[in-house]
Image (tube, rainbow, N blue to C red):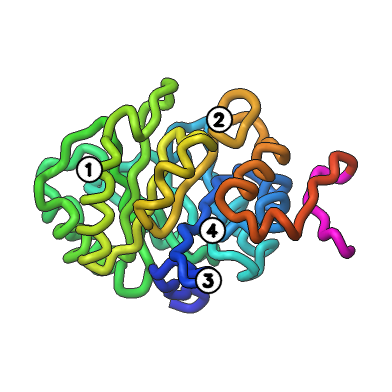
């Protein structure tokens, strides 16, 4: 498909040490600009007021994607829509045509994974799809194999209920480590998200998932409020100190400016 680009699932390496990349979810152009200037690896487009994977309007996704103009990897959610929903193929296709790199699909109401995912398998050849699992839900034991067999590019954990409980309240570090190894063994890109706080970064980075995802942990209030530039800078300081050293937050511009600008 024109405009779609496959992105390697390998995370970066600095001085021989594997570095997990950062995903930050944004809801509008202002937040997108902030994330882009901060050097966020993957800018994820969503409408947090509409749920865990609330979908932005297609026109908004198109405009933000055009603004980014391939300066960062992008993803967009299609909403809290189960994969066996009638017409989901058209929704995924329309989202992909907005120019983003990955389309995220919620693994809701999964009982028979092979049947639910079969209707998306035909799209996965041209559209890099990310399956989003929810920590509160139960999945078939071979769920990762079904996702890989359907041709998905990646898989990530999130929390379905935004009630103050995080991913680590539902799944242990040990089980997450096993999951990352299994998923990457199936050549799936991996992501860990779900009400993650800045304090969790040192706990999760050693697991070597490809991405750690943030939204609510970067907001001063509810997750549908605006991203906090100062919290984003704190995240960079903790997770990507090599980036934080090159950027300084300027309250007068609500953006990051290079030291030498």
**Which badge, 2 or 4, is on the more N-terminal residue?**
4
Q: Are marks 3 and 4 in contact (CB under 8 Å)?
A: no
Q: Write down the residue under mark 3.
A: 15
Give x and y (percent) for residue 67.
69, 62
The residue carrying pointer 3 sits among few (fewer than 14), some (14 to 19) or many (20 or more) residues within 10 Å by Cα, namely few
Residue 41 falls left or right of residue 169: right
Indicate which disc residue 175 carries: 1
Q: Are marks 1 and 2 in contact (CB under 8 Å)?
A: no
What is the distance, in whole Å, between disc 1 and disc 3 at their CAs? 28 Å
Q: Residue at x 39, y 24 (%)?
A: 165
The residue carrying pointer 2 sits among few (fewer than 14), some (14 to 19) or many (20 or more) residues within 10 Å by Cα, namely many
The residue carrying pointer 1 sits among few (fewer than 14), some (14 to 19) or many (20 or more) residues within 10 Å by Cα, namely few
Identify the image quadrant of residue 245. Answer: bottom right
Q: Which residues are magenta?
A: 253-261
Give x and y (percent) for residue 17.
46, 66
Q: Are marks 2 and 3 in contact (CB under 8 Å)?
A: no
**Which badge, 2 or 3, is on the more N-terminal residue?**
3
Q: Residue at x 64, y 68 (%)?
A: 71
**2 vs 3, front mark:** 3
Identify the image quadrant of residue 158. Answer: top left
**Which badge, 1 or 3, is on the more N-terminal residue?**
3
What is the distance, in whole Å, between disc 3 and disc 4 at their CAs? 22 Å
Q: Write down the residue under mark 2.
A: 223
What is the distance, in whole Å, between disc 2 and disc 3 at their CAs? 35 Å
Q: Residue at x 89, y 63 (%)?
A: 261
Q: Write down the residue under mark 4.
A: 42
Indicate which disc residue 92 carries: none
């Amino acid at each position: 498909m024109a405009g779609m680009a496959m992105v390697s699932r390998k995370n970066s390496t600095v001085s021989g040490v594997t570095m997990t990349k950062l995903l930050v979810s944004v809801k509008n152009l202002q937040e997108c600009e902030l994330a882009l200037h901060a050097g966020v690896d993957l800018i994820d487009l969503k409408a947090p007021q509409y749920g865990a994977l609330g979908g932005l309007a297609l026109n908004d996704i198109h405009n933000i994607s055009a603004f980014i103009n391939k300066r960062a990897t992008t993803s967009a959610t299609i909403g809290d829509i189960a994969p066996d929903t009638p017409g989901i193929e058209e929704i995924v296709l329309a989202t992909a045509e907005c120019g983003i790199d990955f389309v995220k699909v919620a693994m809701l109401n999964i009982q028979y994974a092979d049947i639910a995912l079969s209707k998306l398998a035909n799209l996965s050849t041209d559209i890099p799809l990310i399956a989003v699992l929810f920590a509160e839900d139960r999945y078939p034991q071979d769920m990762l194999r079904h996702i890989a067999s359907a041709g998905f590019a990646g898989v990530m954990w999130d929390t379905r209920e935004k009630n103050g409980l995080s991913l680590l309240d539902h799944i242990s570090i040990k089980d997450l480590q096993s999951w990352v190894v299994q998923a990457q063994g199936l050549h799936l890109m991996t992501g860990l998200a779900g009400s993650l706080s800045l304090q969790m970064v040192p706990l999760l980075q050693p697991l070597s998932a490809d991405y750690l995802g943030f939204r609510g942990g970067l907001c001063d209030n509810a997750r549908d409020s605006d991203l906090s530039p100062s919290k984003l800078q704190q995240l960079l300081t903790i997770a990507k100190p090599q980036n934080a050293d090159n950027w300084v937050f300027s309250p007068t511009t609500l953006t990051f400016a290079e030291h030498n600008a």
